[in-house]
Image: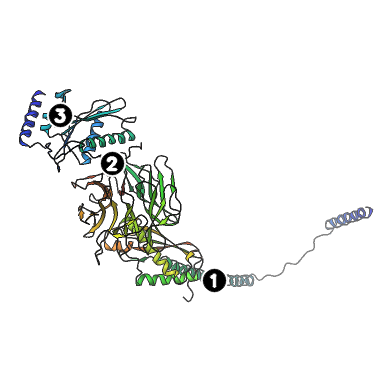
Amino acid sequence: MNHRMTRTLLVVAVVAVASACPRNTPPPVTPSPTVNQDSIDAAERARREAADRAAAARQDSINRANAAREDSLRRAREAVEGVRSALTAPIYFDYDSDALGEAARSALDQKLAILQSNTGVRLRIAGHADERGSDEYNLALGQRRAASAKRYLTQRGIPEAQIEIISFGEERPAASGTDESAYAQNRRDEFEITAGGDALRSPAGT
Amino acid sequence: MTLRLHTVLAALAAVALALPLAAQDTTARGVRIGLTYQPGTRPGVVVLPVNGANGDSIRMILQRDLDFGDRVEIVGREGSTVADVARQQGGTMNYPLWRALGALAIVQATATASGVRVAVHDVAATGILNARDFTLPTPGLSAGWRMALHGVSDEIERWITGTRGAAQTRVAFVRGGRIHIVDSDGYGERAVSEQGTALSPAWHPSGRWIAYSAFGPRGTQIIVRDLQSGGTRVASPRNGLNITPEFSPDGSLLVWGFGEESGTDLVAAPYPGGGDPRRITVGRGSDNVSPSFSPDGRRLAFTSSRAGHPEIYTADVDGANVELLTTYLAGDQSYRSNPAWSPDGRVVAFQSQVAGRFQIMTISLRDRGMKQLTSEGINEDPAWAPDGRHLVFTSSRTGTKQLFVLDAETGRARQLTRAGGARLAAWSRVLDRTP
């Protein structure tokens, strides 16, 4: 206790002496140097230009990197969209038929490859009919059309659980109208991704 | 007034002289219900103005029901002549005068405190054929009152023709994805199911329940709705395609089309017990839908694509003894579907493509004779009235799909629905116990 108090008093004394000193000493006179203002400006200009160049170069490289990243993101997005649209593209049927024609089989082959590379994807196939048949029979026909596409995929190794099917008969036409062109657009299977659609990968080898 | 009546009487006398009397049935043997009149003719019936509360409505409904029944010919439909003649006669019936007017029966109704008192006069026999007091529920003009009055019409039709009418019935149908019901005369239309995609309504014979199919997230289900409580339950235990329900005539069995991944087959489950449905048809990947029971409940008519395109087949309710009913025309793209077994068991109505358009036809179960009943527009989804002579069906003849009622014997058609798009009709049994 005594030691600490002594030390404290000593510190206070030293501070008091030191702060008293300047009042008693006059300020030192320093001689002003000779200055070449031009050379200072030139140096400053050079320094600034160098800094600007460095900044521009840095920005360029950032821009290039950004552009490259956006480009690859866009390509990736486009690739995913391409995969998605190939996977969800409808297939079409003849009147009162669930037979898969050449175009339907080729579209299903594309879907097959995508499903093989995206085992987390769940697909719902909805069968539809044109309005000419019986409303009731067309529900069964739509079911057969959906089952026909599912069978094509499962027979080639896609697990049953990855695909569900449903029929809407003639209740949800894609095209209105009462001509063959509208009918042809309505005799279809639609493919809907019900799960795993956020991380679609392009099929291997493409 | 006197002058005008004289004019009417003179006209009637002229008519009476010019026309042979239609009431001379000499073929009747033994006891016969109803009036006697020449086969192939329709007896003329006058419905007199009705005194008492809602008298005008009572007369209009009775007269319209008898007219829609197509078994009698309404005389003096507009009523002014009939009213004049009736007023001049006072309390007594001038039978010769009515006979001259072409009437064989006179319907005399009076509104009473509890309902309506009806007497039907036999003009040829110059006396009362039958009379009875009918109780009608209150309030007057309510849905229940109307349905009970339709029952009075049906009983009058039985007194006159020997066959009960089918006015005391309703028709269920689909509009805008919802099941609706409407009285047989086009009144009292209302939706009974929620927004959605409901199809193919079918009446339970009791008139209390309606089964139909409804789209859901995992396929299509069979829903049974209680019209009294409004409650529903799912009658199809398995996910997949569950469509085109139909109750057996005794109401103990529910049959429908069930499809997964290899075609659609008819299945049956006890009603209302439920339980696992058992399969009826063995379609081997084909579609087997739209069942219709024979009136004895032993056989089913249904649409099947087992031979390529859809045709009508019949089978026992357990699936045995399958027969092709409609002619299969090889290479013909047209098809036949949506059978409806007539209540008398003699014919099956169905739709058949004729020049690419569906028309309503019947086929005889005895000799396979076919009759085409429609030709105007596209006509689909026939369903029989319980009287066995009227059919309700979907027709495009007005530009939109509407329900029409056709008398299969005379070919007379009337429009039942008028608001946008109606289809897939089902006709109830007589609703004599349902409010």
Quadrant holding the N terminus of chain B: top left
Callouts 3 and 2 close, C-beta under 8 Å: no
Marked residue nearer the N-terminal end (3 or 2)? 3
Whether residue B190 is situated above or below residue A6 in the rendered picture = above
Residue A8 lies in quadrant: bottom right
Q: Which mark is residue B184?
A: 2
> In the structure shown, which secondary structural element does the residue marked by tag 2 occupy?
loop
Q: Nearer the viewer, residue B351 or A62?
A: B351
The local crowd at label 2, few if under 14, some if 14 to 19, many if 20 or more residues have their Cα within 10 Å, is many
In 3D space, how far apart are the residues under numbered discs 3 and 2 (Cα atoms)?
33 Å
In 3D space, how far apart are the residues under numbered discs 2 and 1 (Cα atoms)?
77 Å
Q: Chain of mark 3?
A: B
Q: Seen from this angle, which residue lies furthest front?
A: B30
> In the structure shown, which secondary structural element does the residue marked by tag 1 occupy?
helix
Residue drawn at (48%, 71%), measured in percent from left and top? A116
- Residue highlighted by disc 3: B126
- Residue highlighted by disc 1: A65
**With B197 as the anchor, is B68 left or right in this view?**
left
Whether residue B305 is situated above or below residue B164 in the rendered picture = below
Name the residue type under label 1.
Ala
Whether residue B9 is situated above or below residue A143 in the rendered picture = above
What color scheme is it? rainbow
Residue B411 percent location from the top left of the image: 19, 47
Name the residue type under label 3.
Thr
Quadrant holding the C terminus of chain B: top left
Q: Is residue A21 visible?
A: yes
The local crowd at label 1, few if under 14, some if 14 to 19, many if 20 or more residues have their Cα within 10 Å, is few
